[in-house]
Image: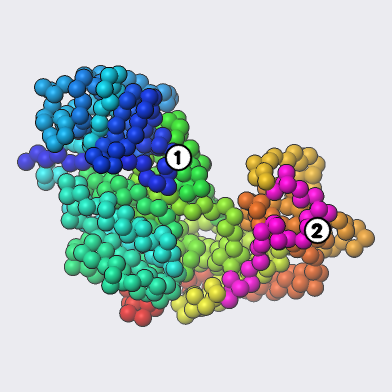
Amino acid sequence: MTIRHKLSNVMLEVAEHVSAHPDLYYRTSGSVSYDGSSSSLVVSGSADFLTYLNACPVIKWRRYAQVSRVWLHIETSAVGSLLRVVGVPSGETDDEQCLSTLSLRPSEGTPVTGGVAYDVELPIAGMDLVAFRLSSDAEPVSLRSAYYYVQVGEGDVNDVRLALSTTTFKKENYIVPNIELVREGLSCEDDPVAGHFHMFVVDNGRTLDADALSDDLVTVIPNENVGGAGGFARGMIAALESDEGFTHVLLMDDDVRIFPESLKRTYNLLALARGRYRTAFVNGAMLSLDEPTRQFEDVSYVDKTAVYRRIKEDLYVDDLADVVKNERTDVEVDHAYGAWWFSCIPLAVIRENGLPLPLFVRCDDVEFGMRNKPTYMTMGGICVWHESFEGRFRASVDCYQYARNFLVMIAMDDCASEDYFLMRLKRSIRINLRDLDYTAAELLLDGFADYLKGPSFLAAADGSALMKSNGARNEKIVPVSEMDPEVLAAAGVTEEVTENPSMEYHVPYVMRFLRGLPYDKHYLPDFALSERPRWVVKNGTATLAGSSTAAKTLVFLDPTRTKGAIRHMDRDRYRAIRHREARLLHEYDGKREAVRREYHDAKGWLTSMEFWKRYLGM
């Protein structure tokens, strides 16, 4: 029996958080507005749906699901409106082309409530993206509904049951609206996902009203504060042990804005996947809440020099050229991982290769990718909007957790060069010391020291208490308005500096070369240093602007340039850090291989159901 199976809905109502960017949904000429009373898009002029959220990426459907024919179902109030099928052909071009034109007449469609329905086969051969443009030169036309679909044998649809697991810690302003978005977005009974979906909310903060928020679609699970790794492990366990027979678990951060259609598209993709893609992971893209048209990342990888690298740099997906580039770029690379802001994982993989490592935060998703070596699928419109990472540096996380957990991952999965990582660790310590960030250097060494304690430390550590104590040591960042104005003035921190984040500074080549040398101003006598403060803009160890050369006092600004701190040279603290670094490196040289073997041998236990149930107090 042949059935109609949706690929994706055409989204007509622009979500509130992207209300200033309707070009993510459609590009217009004339007047286009959404009528909430009739749930329709009213078009006077034309609306072009060859966009990030509403185009049909046939390049991906052809690859992942062997789709060769696609139809468009459209319901309008139209009498005499014009439908143009548009697309971008395969190859080098990213220009839109008109593929066919159809006058919509009632006699050619099927009457439906409030209008007429039409089904049009789209010419997808040789195309990467297809969509449609609806126009009316006379009376306004109301577009009530549209979706892309295929016709397949009923037995050719994979049995998919999807569990969404989101971990939250005191983020009610995000998680409660997201629960409602899921309820509202998945209430349509004619979507294939209906009856094959459930949402688990793992509440690490125990601040949600579980009884009030739980129902047939949503289950809130109170949990100890065991970090992202522990929360996602708890959600995986819930999916594995459910009587609903879930086949996949979709992991999602709490500080995001959900696009419910992404859940439907993920389900549809899994239901139609063919060949090796039946067991693939689906990773959604992360777009910035601060810049809603900027796609930051979907799939990344770890290179042999122990560096995270994005497969795609920033894409601005209100631009058709970047929409096309997003679909054409291959994400199937070695050592790939998908971050857990939106990552859909087959439960069979978890049964075979285990749950996450108990890393609390940082590298849990990366290590899971390194261990499982999955094939990843991505697709435009499968995404979330996430809080921006700029200006969120915290040494307790970005130094301690990163150093410890990345070393654990290398030992467990042999995914990168440990020698390169140690070289980078030592370089990061030196750069932080140059810039008078003693806390960051100390926490890097703390992470290194705790790695050397072996897997028994990791298994027994109270991650919440450790995060709290390390967090209390973070540098106190304050608004620029609260910093000492005399020091700011002496350092040259003017309004031009603080109010222009995109301001470019020319640094002479000789100065760039000198900064790259392994010098350390702590070795210089006081008379060789400047009493005049300097300023620097940094993101982690990366210097974005300014200079700390020869400065005994330094004004640090975060990437937003709205906050910062004033740092002073402390030679005693510097010497203590360097002596400790030498001691730890000596200890590392003596036990390097033994510690690595211990981690590798403990991987099965630390990722087992038995371990996690004990760890979670289940």
The outermost residue toward the right is 527
Q: Is residue 413 visible?
A: no
Q: What's the distance in space between the residues labelled 1 and 2, CA to CA?
A: 40 Å
Q: Residues within 10 Å of mark 2 (few under 14, many from 20)?
A: some
Q: What percent of the width, then of the height, locates residue 273?
A: 24, 45
User: In the rendering, which numbered label is found on residue 487?
Assistant: 2
The answer to whether the residues at label 1 and label 2 have Cβ atoms under 8 Å apart is no
Q: Secondary structure at mark 1?
A: loop
Can you say which quadrant of the picture contains the N terminus? Answer: top left
Q: Is residue 149 left or right of residue 431?
A: left
Who is closer to the viewer here, 604 or 496? 496
| Above or below, 256 relative to 101 | below
Span highlighted in magenta in the image: 469-498
| Tag nearer the camera, 1 or 2 | 1
| Above or below, 115 relative to 430 | above
- Who comes first in sequence, dot 1 or dot 2? 1
> What amino acid is found at the position of numbered circle 1 in the picture?
Ala
Q: Secondary structure at mark 2?
A: helix
Is-magenta flag for residue 414?
no
Is-magenta flag for residue 490?
yes
Q: Is residue 252 visible?
A: yes
Colouring of the image: rainbow
Q: What percent of the width, then of the height, locates residue 242?
A: 22, 68
Q: Is residue 385 left or right of residue 138?
A: right
Residue at the image position 66 percent from the left and 62 percent from the top: 478
> What amino acid is found at the position of numbered circle 2 in the picture?
Val
Q: Residues within 10 Å of mark 1 (few under 14, many from 20)?
A: few
Q: Is residue 107 left or right of residue 331?
A: left
Q: Quadrant of residue 588?
A: bottom right
* Residue identifier under label 1: 20
